[in-house]
Amino acid sequence: MLTPDELTRFARHIVLRHIGGPGQQRLRAAKVLVVGAGGLGSPLLLYLAAAGVGTLGIVDDDTVSLSNLQRQVIHAVADLDRPKVESAGAAVAALDPAIRVVPHAMRLTAENAAALVADYDAIADGSDNFDTRYLLADACAAAKKPLVTAAVNEMHGSLTTLRPFDTRPNGTNWPGYRDLYPEKPPAGAIPTCSEAGVLGALCGVIGSLQAIEVIRQITPFGSPLLGKILLVDALDMRFETFEY
């Protein structure tokens, strides 16, 4: 049951016919794991917290540096050299003290991936490397957990939702990450953000869209990006969705 304060806090969701009181209660009871508290994880965590997700797990082994602040808006100058899980957790608590924050100050690996995803209802990938993306996608598929995965680089972003353990209306399974990207790119084939740069505000756009897809996994509405990838080109301001 929502408290009187929560009824006020989430009033705009409760009157929204696509969420309503039951949907808000589902959000409050939900547990979401966010991998990466950086450019994508920053807006993602803030909007999941604002939406009232009851438990937020944060996976990140990094500390806040000055170069992060151009796009990682959950952190501030006062957080420099602080573990990102602590900084992000404090920002979430400042927004809504009722949210349970579970910090995982570690890198996701083949040894811990299954255990990390096991206790959560939905997973969001805001990581910055292909090793983590493949490991996380495999772990979520094995555990039958929905995964919302996004990426940004330079002036471009992408977003898709993965539920390869569920079936389409025609009886076939929805595609997984390895259907979209069968082979991991060779090391160094794609420049990192530190090498090629990234438009800071684009992280906010993609991270916010990622939050919508995560919320949709908890309290369903509309059409998720299952078997579809959204591509955003900030250079020419184009949004395109392709089936795969």
Image: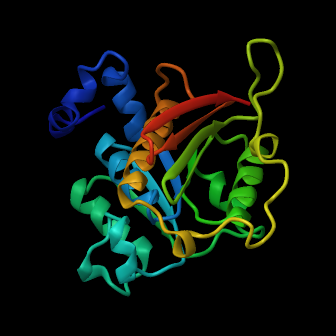
Q: Is residue 177 above or below residue 95?
A: above
Which residue is at 19% across, 29% downward?
11
> From the viewer's perspective, is residue 152 above or below residue 237?
below
Of 161 and 166, which appears nearest the observer?
Answer: 161
Residue most extreme to the front? 236
- Please state the horizontal and vertical placement of residue 227, each as a whole percent of the image: 69, 29
Picture quadrant where residue 78 is located: bottom left
Q: Quadrant of residue 90?
A: bottom left
Foreground pick, 189 / 17 = 189
Q: Residue at x 48, y 43 (%)?
A: 210
In the image, taking residue 240 as reference, residue 112 lies left or right, namely: right
Instruction: Pick the quarter of the image with the N terminus.
Output: top left
Residue 114 shows in the view:
no
Image coordinates for residue 13, horizontal then vertical, percent:
27, 28
| Residue farthest along the top direction in this orientation | 170
Please report the residue visible at 46 percent of the width from the left and 65 percent of the height from the top. 37
Q: Is residue 205 above or below residue 170?
A: below
Q: Position of residue 119 (x, y in %)?
A: 60, 52
